[in-house]
Amino acid sequence: MKKITAVKKGLKGQVTVPGDKSISHRALILGALAEGITEIENFLVAQDTLATLNCLKKYGVRIERKDAFVRIFGSDQNFSEPQDVLDAQNSGTTIRLLSGVAATFPFVSVFTGDASLRRRPMKRVLEPLTQMGAMVLARGQGDYAPFAIKGGKLRGQDFILKKASAQVKSALLLAGLRAEGNTSVTEPQLSRDHTERMLVGFGAKIKREGLRVEISGGQKLLGQKVVVPGDFSTASFFIVAALVVPDSHLIIKNVGLNPTRTGLLTVLKEMGANIQILNFHENSGEPVGDLEVKYSPLKAVEVPPEIVPAMIDEFPILAVAMALAYGKSQVRGAEELRVKESDRIKSIVSEFSKMGVAVKELPDGFIISGGNKILGTTVDSHHDHRIAMSLAVLGLTAAGTTEILNAEAVAISYPEFFQQLSKLTEGA
Ligand code: S3P
């Protein structure tokens, strides 16, 4: 349990957020498959990314880590049949991306995860991998972990996804890299493209035409140095905290600004947010910059459904901004939120309403009438890191104390979140 009390002064100064979670997972996986040494700087040290690291070690990959620096001795010959079950814990990215890799090995890989991950849909990756030639046996009519994959010689295919998903796209591109012939993935909207960018950085050739991306099989990757930018999704909690606490002025340094991730900035700006990008540059194939955020009175917004994939992980914290904005805000076309680390539509509706927010559940989103007085009370993270951090930010604006149950979930993506938040608010 964690207690949050209302802040009396604005959040001021500079903050640096840890490395990007999606990019850290991918750097480990591509580094393991590439020939030679890969070095990762500013790797995210958190439960999700360590789950990927430990699964790769179980395949026999040699990996050394000292804090946020990782060295991988890569080679696709390194992988051998794991002696035990691969535990992806809470991490959808671990289980789905590694399934794509596992499908190319002529031996058995068995995957599982924690209670949340075992409830999340896996058919979206397992079915196309089966079509490419892998053998899969999964619980719950082929949709849930634990599952076993025996791969081998895969055949490239053309896939058209019904929903934008970077995890599905990445799994299929990784399988396609080691399949015979070409594999393409076409999405309805562009999901985060870190895998494509990093594959190019590791020497692979990729063809992109609009929403279609194609890779030809049999290409070799070469070990690289990867500098991971700060995680935009993590930065989003401080962005919104600075926007809603009066008199705040915060600089968030070295944040990844890949446009497939920054939909939240577009929506917040429409709400009236004062956010500037400074020092914009590129590092390891990814756009990076500093964000300067000032307290801003916000007005309600309707989120256009086509922007949903570019801000899929930011809806819990956007809901905080909406709760404190003037007027009625709406999110539609976001039914994917129901199959994240928790059912995020339900988590937002149940916990925010306990704190006095006028929020109404929709099948594919929610409506928030902003401006109610926020009340401190006991709330629950539903074991979801992003819900825990969002409730903490909402708690900064509440009358009285907010007690967050299962707050330790923040360790999934940001173990030092509460220390950093109290530094910012105490310094305030
Ligand atoms: C991720 C993709 C997204 C996102 C998740 C991380 C990734 O999931 O929600 O937190 O690293 O590829 P989907 O691909 O299921 O949309």
Image (spheres, helix red, strand yellow):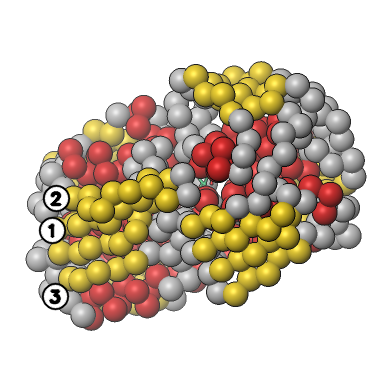
Cα distance, mark 1 to mark 2? 7 Å
1 and 2 marks in contact (CB < 8 Å): yes
Label 2: element kind: strand
Quarter in which the C terminus is drawn: bottom left
The label on residue 37 is: none
Task: Give the Cα distance between marks 3 and 2.
Answer: 21 Å
| Residue drawn at (18%, 42%) of the image | 269
Element carrying mark 1: loop
Residue at the spot of label 2: 274
Residue 221, image x and y in percent? 68, 42
Give neighbour class at mark 2: few <14, some 14-19, many 20+ (Cα, 10 Å).
some
Classify mark 3: helix, strand or loop.
Answer: loop
Q: Residue flagged by tag 3: what amino acid is it?
A: Lys
Q: Would you place residue 165 above or below residue 383 in this image?
A: above
Q: Residue at x 23, y 75 (%)?
A: 425
> Is residue 163 shown above or below 410?
above
Taking the image as shown, residue 210 lies to the left or right of residue 196, namely: left
The number of numbered discs placed on residues in the rendered structure image is 3
- The residue identified by callout 1 is 295
Q: Which residue is mark 3?
A: 8
On the rendered structure, is 149 left or right of 404? Answer: right
Q: Amino acid at mark 2?
A: Asn
Q: Position of residue 215 (x, y in %)?
A: 64, 27
